[in-house]
C-alpha cells in the first residue's frame, strides 16, 4: 500500500502543474483508498499554450477539460477517472517531440490528443507511432493520414485542407464566379489548400488567373495586391492562416478589392475573425465548427452550454471544440471497449459512430480520418446577436466519404 | 510570363513608396541613435509596437487619430528617455555589444508586458473614417491612408532635417556625433544630448507604430519582423546616415514592391539580396561614414 501511495503523491505534484481538471481528478484517489488503486486514465495533451496560437490552444484545453469532466461525472470507467496532462509544445516540432516522449515515458499516459499545427502534429505522431500510443490529432493536415506518416495508432479528428478547401471551393466557385486568383502563404499548409481548391475547381471549369505566393509571416501585402486587382478575378482565395490572414484581408479590403471580387479563405477562425474586426465583412470561408450551429444541432447546444457554464458564458471556438471531440472520442472508445488496452481501444474507435458536438461523424477505416460536415461561413458585422456572433452559416456540406481523397490515393490498401 | 501594363508598374511604384515610408521612419530613428550614440537599439521594434498599442488605446479613448499622432511620440519618447538615463547610460564605454544585449532583452520585456495588458491576439484597428477607402489616382485605386502615410513621412523627415541642420541644438547634436571629446571640452554636457537623441529616436519609432497600426492592426509581435527590415534599411543606407536612411527606405520599399510583382516568393529575400549587393559595392552602405563601427 505504501509503495502504491508514494507514486500517487508524486503524481499529484505533476497534476497541479497539469491543470485544474487534473487536480479535480486526483481528489478522489487521494481520499478514497479503494479508488487509489484504480489508476487514472491519462491523456497527454500537447498544445502551443505560448506563442501566436496561444488563444486557440487555451480554448482547446478548456474544451478538453469538459470532455474529461463529463466522463468522470458519469462515474469514469470502472471507477477509473480520466485525467488531462496538458503540455506546452510551443508550436515547435522538436519541443513537441520531447514533451510527447516525456508524457509517454515519465507520465505513462494512455493516450495522446492535441497539437495545433501541421508540422507539430507530424512530430507528435512520429513519437506516438514508434511507442505504440494512440494519437488523436486535432489540427488540420493532409499528410498525417497518408500512408507514409500514418500508423494504426493515428487518428485525425480535425478536418484537412483537402476537405475544407474542397467544400469552400465548390461553394464559392459555383456562387461567385469561375475566374479565380490565389494569394498563398508559401509553405505546406498554403500549398495543400491551393491543391484542394484547384481539385474542387477542375470539374467546374475554373480559370486560375494568378497563383501568387507570399512569404509566410509577411507584415505587408500591399505589393501583391495591385496585380491581383488589375486581373479583376471573381474570387480571390487567401490561402494563409492566423495573422497573415487577418492582415491580408484587411489590406485587400483597403485596396477596394471587395468592389469587384469576393474574398474567400479556406478556413475562417473564430479567434482570428474577432482579432480582425470589420474588415472581415463578407469574407467567406470554411470551418469545422461555429457555435451558432446550436440553432440546428442538439449536440452543439449541449456542448456550448457545458462550455458556457464552465467558462463564464464564453462560447467555444472551432479549434476549442476539436479539443473536446478529440478527448471525448478516446474516452468513449475506452468505455465501449471496456478496456484501456491500446489495440482494443483502436478497434472501438474505428467502430465509433458519434455525434459529440456537430452532428454525425465516424473515422474512415483505411486512414482514421474523421468523416464530418464542413461549415461554410460568411463574416458579418450587422444583425449580430452578441459580440460572439461574427459569422452566419451560409451552407453545410454534409459528411461524405466521396469528398475525401481515396484510400488508394493516400497510399493505403483499401 | 504575362506582360505587365505600365499602369500596373506605376501602381506598384506608388505601393513601394508607401511601403518605404514606414521603413524610412523606422530606419531614421534607428540610424539617429546609432549615428550619435553608437548604440544598436534592438528594442526599436518594441518601441514601434508600444507606440502602435498606445495609439490604438488612445484612439479608443478620444476617437481622434490626431491626438494619437501627437501624444504617442511624446509618451514613447518619454519611455525612451527613462531607458537611456537609467539602463543604457551605465553601459557607455563598454563596447557595442552591451547596449545591444540590453535592448534585445528589453524588447522581450515590452512584448511580454503588452501581452499581459492586451492579450496574445492582436487588436483590430482601421484608419480613421476620414482616411478610409481607396481613391482613384489616375492609374487605379489606391488606399487613401497609404497616401496619407507618404505625406506624413515627408513631414516628419523634413521637420527632423530642419531641426538638425537649422537649429542651434541640432548643431550641437551634429558636433557631438562627430567628436564628443571636443564638444565636452567646449563645456557642453554630451550626456544630455545623447539623452535627447535617444528620446527623439524612440519617439519616431512610436510615431511610426501609430502610423502603421491602421495598415495591419496591432499585435505584440508586430515589431519583430519589421525590426529586421529596418536594420537592413539602415545598413543599406549607411549606419548613422539620415539621408541614407531616407533613400534606402524608399529603395527597399520599391524593390520589395517590384519583386512582389515579378517573383512574389522572393519578396522577403529580395531586401537581403539588395543588402548583400550594396555591401559588396559599398561596404559602408550608400551614405555611410567611415570608422563608426570601429
Image (spheres, coloured by chain):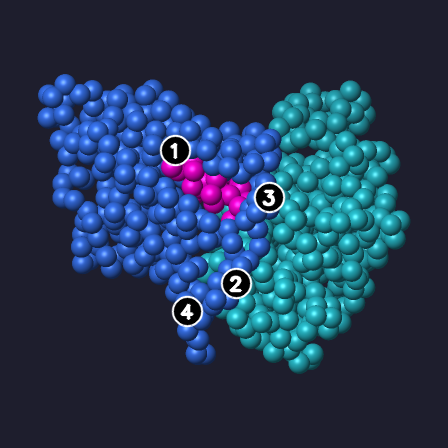
Q: CA distance from mark 1 to mark 4?
A: 35 Å
Q: CA distance from mark 1 to mark 2?
A: 33 Å
Crowding at dot 4, Cα within 10 Å, few <14 / some 14-19 / many 20+, comes out as some
User: Same chain for marks 1 and 2?
Assistant: yes
Q: CA distance from mark 1 to mark 3?
A: 23 Å
In this view, the residue in front, A144 or A91, is: A91
- Above or below — where is A20 with respect to A122? above
Give the chain coloured cyan: A
Instruction: Report the magenta residues as a range.
Output: B202-224
**Between discs 3 and 2, the one toward the N terminus:** 3
User: Same chain for marks 4 and 2?
Assistant: yes
Residue at x-position 70% and y-position 65%:
A168
List x then y, in percent, for residue A126: 57, 54
Are the two marked residues, 1 and 4, in contact with CB atoms closer than 8 angstroms?
no
List x then y, in percent, for residue B67: 51, 33
Q: CA distance from mark 4 to mark 2?
A: 16 Å
List x then y, in percent, for residue A314: 75, 37
Residue at x-position 51% and y-position 43%:
B213
- The residue where tag 3 is placed is B124
Q: Is residue A333 left or right of residue A141?
A: right
Q: Could you tell me if residue B49 is visible in this image?
A: no
Q: Main secondary structure of the magenta part?
A: helix
User: Same chain for marks 1 and 3?
Assistant: yes
- Above or below — where is A118 with respect to B41? below
Q: Colour of chain B?
A: blue
- The residue where tag 1 is placed is B203
Q: Secondary structure at mark 2?
A: strand
Residue at x-position 42% and y-position 60%:
B14
**Between discs 1 and 3, the one toward the N terminus:** 3
Q: Considering the image in quadrants, where does the C terminus of chain B appear?
A: top left
How many numbered discs? Answer: 4
Amino acid at each position: 500500500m505504501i509503495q502504491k501511495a508514494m507514486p500517487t503523491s508524486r503524481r499529484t505534484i505533476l497534476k497541479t502543474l497539469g491543470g485544474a481538471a487534473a487536480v479535480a481528478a486526483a481528489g478522489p484517489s487521494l481520499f478514497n483508498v479503494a479508488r487509489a488503486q484504480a489508476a487514472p486514465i491519462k491523456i497527454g495533451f500537447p498544445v502551443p499554450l505560448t506563442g501566436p496560437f496561444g488563444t486557440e490552444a487555451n480554448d482547446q484545453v478548456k474544451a478538453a477539460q469538459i470532455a474529461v469532466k463529463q466522463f468522470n461525472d458519469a462515474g469514469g470507467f470502472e471507477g477509473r477517472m480520466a485525467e488531462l496532462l496538458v503540455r506546452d509544445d510551443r508550436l515547435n516540432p522538436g519541443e513537441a517531440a520531447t514533451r510527447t516522449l516525456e508524457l509517454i515515458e515519465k507520465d505513462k499516459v494512455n493516450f495522446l490528443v492535441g497539437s495545433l499545427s501541421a508540422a507539430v502534429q507530424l512530430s507528435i505522431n512520429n513519437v506516438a507511432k514508434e511507442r505504440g500510443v494512440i494519437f488523436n490529432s486535432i489540427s488540420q493536415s493532409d499528410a498525417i493520414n497518408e500512408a507514409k506518416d500514418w500508423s494504426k495508432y493515428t487518428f485525425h479528428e480535425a478536418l484537412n485542407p483537402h476537405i475544407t478547401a474542397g467544400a469552400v471551393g465548390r461553394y464559392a466557385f459555383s456562387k461567385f464566379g469561375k475566374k479565380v486568383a490565389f494569394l498563398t502563404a508559401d509553405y505546406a499548409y498554403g500549398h495543400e489548400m491551393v491543391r484542394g481548391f484547384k481539385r474542387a475547381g477542375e470539374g467546374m471549369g475554373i480559370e486560375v488567373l494568378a497563383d501568387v505566393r507570399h512569404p509566410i509571416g509577411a507584415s505587408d501585402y500591399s505589393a501583391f495586391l495591385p496585380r491581383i486587382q488589375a486581373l479583376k478575378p471573381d474570387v480571390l482565395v487567401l490561402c494563409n492562416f492566423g495573422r497573415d490572414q487577418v492582415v491580408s484581408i484587411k489590406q485587400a479590403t483597403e485596396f477596394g478589392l471587395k468592389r469587384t471580387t469576393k474574398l474567400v479563405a479556406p478556413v475562417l477562425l473564430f479567434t482570428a475573425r474577432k482579432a480582425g474586426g470589420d474588415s472581415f465583412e463578407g469574407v467567406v470561408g470554411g470551418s469545422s465548427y461555429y457555435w451558432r450551429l446550436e440553432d440546428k444541432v442538439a449536440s452543439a447546444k449541449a456542448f456550448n452550454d457545458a462550455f458556457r457554464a464552465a467558462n463564464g458564458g464564453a462560447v467555444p471556438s472551432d479549434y476549442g471544440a476539436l479539443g473536446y471531440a478529440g478527448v471525448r472520442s478516446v474516452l468513449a472508445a475506452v468505455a465501449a471497449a471496456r478496456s484501456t488496452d491500446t489495440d482494443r481501444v483502436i478497434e472501438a474507435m474505428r467502430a465509433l459512430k458519434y455525434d459529440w458536438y456537430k452532428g454525425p461523424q465516424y473515422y474512415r477505416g483505411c486512414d482514421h480520418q474523421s468523416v464530418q460536415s464542413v461549415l461554410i461561413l460568411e463574416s458579418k458585422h450587422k444583425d449580430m446577436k452578441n459580440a460572439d456572433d461574427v459569422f452566419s452559416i451560409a451552407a453545410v456540406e454534409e459528411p461524405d466519404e466521396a469528398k475525401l481523397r481515396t484510400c488508394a490515393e493516400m497510399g493505403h490498401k483499401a | 510570363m504575362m506582360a505587365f501594363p505600365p499602369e500596373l508598374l506605376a501602381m506598384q511604384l506608388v505601393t513601394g513608396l508607401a511601403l518605404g515610408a514606414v521603413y524610412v521612419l523606422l530606419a531614421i530613428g534607428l540610424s539617429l541613435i546609432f549615428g550619435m550614440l553608437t548604440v544598436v537599439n534592438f528594442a526599436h521594434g518594441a518601441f514601434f509596437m508600444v507606440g502602435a498599442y498606445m495609439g490604438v488605446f488612445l484612439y479608443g479613448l478620444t476617437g481622434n487619430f490626431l491626438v494619437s499622432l501627437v501624444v504617442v511620440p511624446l509618451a514613447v519618447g518619454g519611455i525612451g528617455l527613462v531607458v537611456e538615463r537609467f539602463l543604457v547610460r551605465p553601459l557607455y564605454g563598454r563596447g557595442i555589444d552591451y547596449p545591444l544585449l540590453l535592448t534585445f532583452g528589453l524588447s522581450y520585456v515590452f512584448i511580454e508586458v503588452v501581452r499581459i495588458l492586451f492579450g496574445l491576439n492582436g487588436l483590430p484597428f482601421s484608419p480613421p473614417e476620414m482616411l478610409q477607402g481607396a481613391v482613384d489616382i489616375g492609374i487605379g485605386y489606391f488606399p487613401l491612408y497609404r497616401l496619407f502615410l507618404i505625406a506624413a513621412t515627408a513631414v516628419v523627415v523634413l521637420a527632423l532635417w530642419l531641426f538638425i541642420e537649422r537649429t542651434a541644438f541640432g548643431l550641437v547634436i551634429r558636433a557631438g556625433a562627430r567628436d564628443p571629446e571636443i564638444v565636452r571640452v567646449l563645456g557642453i554636457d554630451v550626456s544630455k544630448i545623447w539623452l535627447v537623441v535617444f528620446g527623439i529616436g524612440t519617439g519616431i519609432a512610436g510615431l511610426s507604430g501609430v502610423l502603421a497600426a491602421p495598415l495591419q492592426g496591432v499585435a505584440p509581435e508586430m515589431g519583430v519582423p519589421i525590426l529586421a527590415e529596418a536594420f537592413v534599411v539602415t545598413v543599406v543606407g549607411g549606419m548613422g546616415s539620415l539621408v541614407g536612411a531616407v533613400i534606402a527606405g524608399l529603395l527597399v520599399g520599391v524593390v520589395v514592391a517590384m519583386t512582389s510583382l515579378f517573383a512574389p516568393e522572393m519578396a522577403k529575400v529580395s531586401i537581403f539580396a539588395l543588402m548583400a549587393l550594396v555591401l559588396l559595392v559599398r561596404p559602408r552602405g550608400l551614405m555611410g561614414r567611415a570608422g563608426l563601427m570601429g
